[in-house]
Amino acid sequence: MFRPMLRLQVTTDVVIAVVLAALVYVTTGQRVDAPLAFVTLIGLTGALALRRLSPGLALTIAWVVAVFEVTTGQTPGVENAFMSGILYTSSRYGTGRVRAAGLVSAIIGPVIVAVYLGLDDLREREHIVTATTPQQESLRVAVSYFAVVLLLLLLPWLAGVIARTRRSASMSREAQLLAERDAARADRAVAVEQERVRIARDMHDIVAHSLAVVIAQADGARYALKADPAIADEALGTISSTARRALGDVRELLGALRHEQGTAPTPDIDDIDRLLREMREVGLDIRMEREGDPTDLPTSTQLAVYRIVQESLTNAWKHGEPGTPVHATLTYRPDTVEVTVVNRRADDGTRGPGTGHGLVGMRERAAMTGGTMTAGARGDDFAVAVRMPTVPASGQMPRGLLPTGTPTPPPTTSTPQERTAR
């Protein structure tokens, strides 16, 4: 029944109602001196004081006072203008029922006033000679009163509805701004998380493969140092070049993270041959089969193919059975490219368990291009199978299908750099 309001607001409403009642009493003192008129003034003042605290109660009190005023035969005075403020607050602060009751009051009230004053005017005109009949004159008076009271009651009610609508629109706008702010924060959080995942994937692809080659060559050099120093020297050279290349890749990746840069050169299909040589040097028996023409593959798809082959071969060396061949197949079709790597699983427990980051990174790269990946045991073997569209989900055009007049991008170098900034 009562709206939550500050004590200062309630006090302000009471003071305003009392001041207005005092002004009415001063200006119409002789009429208000009548007991019935004084009761009407007190009742409307109380209703005006409660107009915001309890719009429904204020409207009810106003109706009770109006009925009392009619039944006691009083002539409406200036204090009846208080009803305009009551109807305004009923539509602005009231509930749906109170708002509807205010609208009904704004329509029925003028009708009651017109009938009441029209009949009173008709009684006074019964013994007065006029150009027209007394009924016609009283009807004109009633219509005039109806129009005036309707404006005094309906306009404040409509003003309250407008104020309520504007307040609701303002609150909706604030809620929308808060929702947009929360959505922006969520987008930033997602972007940060995606960037963290991208950095982790790039660091894994750059460092894990290079360290695997370095470890394999170091182990080989240690055993071959006494038997054949030339082999040990060759292994140390491979370690040096691999570590230097990995260091350059990491530096370029860190530089791209510190400064906003363009897309750095990325490994492509041609770099797979160098990758195969590196893995064969560490003792991995790779049997590669290729089918189709990869020249029209987009850069992002070539990068994904290279990284997936790199990670698959590294996993085969780390977790596969030593001395068994690794079968790799690259199939380039007009609309898809397929990568398959199969190796024998090691059952002697000599190979350490993996962290799983490599498989996650391969699956993410396949998903980024709109492709799919499956990886798991297949009998005694472990198989990785990836299928990606030749046109990635990002909409990047293949190199050979660029529109006429668009300059062809320069060929990427075979030196791996910060290539995974996508």
Image (cartoon, helix red, strand yellow):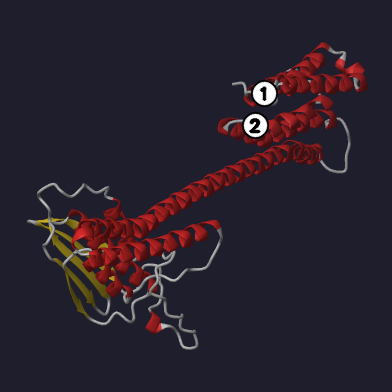
Considering the image in quadrants, where does the N terminus appear?
A: top right
Looking at the image, the residue that sits furthest to the top is 35
Q: Which mark is residue 158?
A: none
Q: Amino acid at mark 1?
A: Met
Quadrant hosting residue 403: bottom left
Measure the C-alpha gap from mark 2 to mark 1.
12 Å
> Disc 2 on helix, strand or loop?
helix
Residue 191 x %, y %? 47, 52
Residue drawn at point x = 36 percent, y = 63 percent: 240
Residue drawn at point x = 78 percent, y = 16 percent: 42
Residue 123 x %, y %? 80, 28
Considering the image in quadrants, where does the C terminus appear?
A: bottom left
Q: Nearer the viewer, mark 2 or mark 1?
A: 1
**Depicted 52 relative to depicted 304: above or below:** above
Residue situated in front as seen by the camera: 72 or 181:
181
Of mark 2 and mark 1, the one earlier in the sequence is: 1
Residue 239 x %, y %? 32, 62
Quadrant hosting residue 29: top right
Residue situated in front as seen by the camera: 86 or 109:
86
**Depicted 406 relative to depicted 52: above or below:** below
Q: Amino acid at mark 2?
A: Tyr
Q: Left of 143 or right of it: where is 218?
A: left
What residue is pinned by disc 1? 5
**Depicted 246 relative to depicted 337: above or below:** above
Q: Left of 195 or right of it: where is 81?
A: right
Residue 385 x %, y %? 20, 64
Q: Left of 311 or right of it: where is 421?
A: right
What residue is pinned by disc 2? 93
**Depicted 361 relative to depicted 128: above or below:** below
Residue drawn at point x = 11 percent, y = 61 percent: 323
